[in-house]
């Protein structure tokens, strides 16, 4: 599994039954057909499966083990990290504790099942939950965790107004109608990783972002005055987007850093981005769930 750039990023009347008449029923049928058509178009563009997880647990104690079997005497999941790495992007891998390490790597003291971490539940066996562990660094899909060390945690549906709220920390935009209804754009910036634009879809109250639909972004003043305010291209399987200052917003004032202002993008520019990234089929999909007590949490899943 290839390392996926982190990033990183976040968070729609009814009519009383007695009022329904034959004419209203006909109208409802038309409306339903239109809605179905729009949904089918969106799904055909993004091609993602419904959110795969329904039950979750949260770690409630410290120093919790993730076991290979439903037995505290079985091997635990551990992380190995480059021993001579001096950057923030060290190579690492996960494996079971009964397997030998590799030359040039050392065992990390990191607690994988740290307190407050959320895991999707795949099943139960005795006093253990089988939880989902695959992520952008770990290829091992599942492990067992003691029920004594976790508690249940509920997720809630993500709504468009949540994502676009003024007090939301996300730089986010959701397409509200037309062919690309419910397509989500999330732009993140940090000083270390730079700027990244993610393109996904709001599906069944969860944001699904195909792993490859992550775009490296950069403001280029030289685009100013040209016929193109925004340019997106693919190079060796990765996507890159350049935009001029007229489409920007301040990211970090003290560092004079900028990021893409999604609200300034025209429908044509949004379409250009979507049509470019959807030419590629993803290997993994990142599903972002909302937990009221935790905020947004992401889980990677093999694309179907």
Image (tube, rainbow, N blue to C red):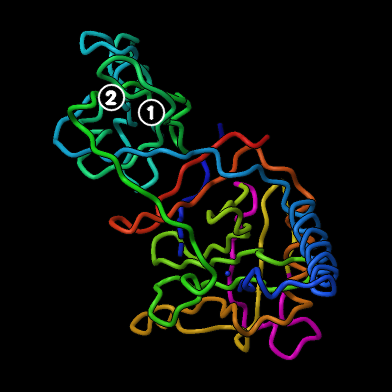
Element under label 2?
strand
Q: Where is residue 87 in the image (x, y as percent from the top left)?
A: 34, 47
- Would you say residue 91 sits in the magenta stretch? no
Q: Rounded to the nearest whole Å, what is the CA distance between mark 1 and mark 2?
A: 7 Å
- Between residue 52 and residue 7, name the one nearer to us: 52
Tell me the quarter of the image containing the N terminus: top right
**Which mark sits nearer the N-terminus, 1 or 2?**
1
Residue farthest to the left?
62
Expressed as whole percent of the image width and height from the top left, the position of residue 249 reads: 51, 84
Q: Name the residue under label 2.
A: 145
Q: Is residue 60 left or right of residue 256?
A: left
Give the left or right position of residue 116, taking residue 300 as reference: left
Question: Are there few (<14), some (14-19), or many (20+) residues within 10 Å of tag 2?
Answer: many
Element type at mark 1: strand
Residue named by callout 1: 131
Which of the two residues, 88 or 291, is positioned nearer the viewer here? 291
Q: Residue at point 60% right, 66% down?
A: 185
Residue 79, relative to residue 59: is it above or below? Answer: above
């Amino acid at each position: 599994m290839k390392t996926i750039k982190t990033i990183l990023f976040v968070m729609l009347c009814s009519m009383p039954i007695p009022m329904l008449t034959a004419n209203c029923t006909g109208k409802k049928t038309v409306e339903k057909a239109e809605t179905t058509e729009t949904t089918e178009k969106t799904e055909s563009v993004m091609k993602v499966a419904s959110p795969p997880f329904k039950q979750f647990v949260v770690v409630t104690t410290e120093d919790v083990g993730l076991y290979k079997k439903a037995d505290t005497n079985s091997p635990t999941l551990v992380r190995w990290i480059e021993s001579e790495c001096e950057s923030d992007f060290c190579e690492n891998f996960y494996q079971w504790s009964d397997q030998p390490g590799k030359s040039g790597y050392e065992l990390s003291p990191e607690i994988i099942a740290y307190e407050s971490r959320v895991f999707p539940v795949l099943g139960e066996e005795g006093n253990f939950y089988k939880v989902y562990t695959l992520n952008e660094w770990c290829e091992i899909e599942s492990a067992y965790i003691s029920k004594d060390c976790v508690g249940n945690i509920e997720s809630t549906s993500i709504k468009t107004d949540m994502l676009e709220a003024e007090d939301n920390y996300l730089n986010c935009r959701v397409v509200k109608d037309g062919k690309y209804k419910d397509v989500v754009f999330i732009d993140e910036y940090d000083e270390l990783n730079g700027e990244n634009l993610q393109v996904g879809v709001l599906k069944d109250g969860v944001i699904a972002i195909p792993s490859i639909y992550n775009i490296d972004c950069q403001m280029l003043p030289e685009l100013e005055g040209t016929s193109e305010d925004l340019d997106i291209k693919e190079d060796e399987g990765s996507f890159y987007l350049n935009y001029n200052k007229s489409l920007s917003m301040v990211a970090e004032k003290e560092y004079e850093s900028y990021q893409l202002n999604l609200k300034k993008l025209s429908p044509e520019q949004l379409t250009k981005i979507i049509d470019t990234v959807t030419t590629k089929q993803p290997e993994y999909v990142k599903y972002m769930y909302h937990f009221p007590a935790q905020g947004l949490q992401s889980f990677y899943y093999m694309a179907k």
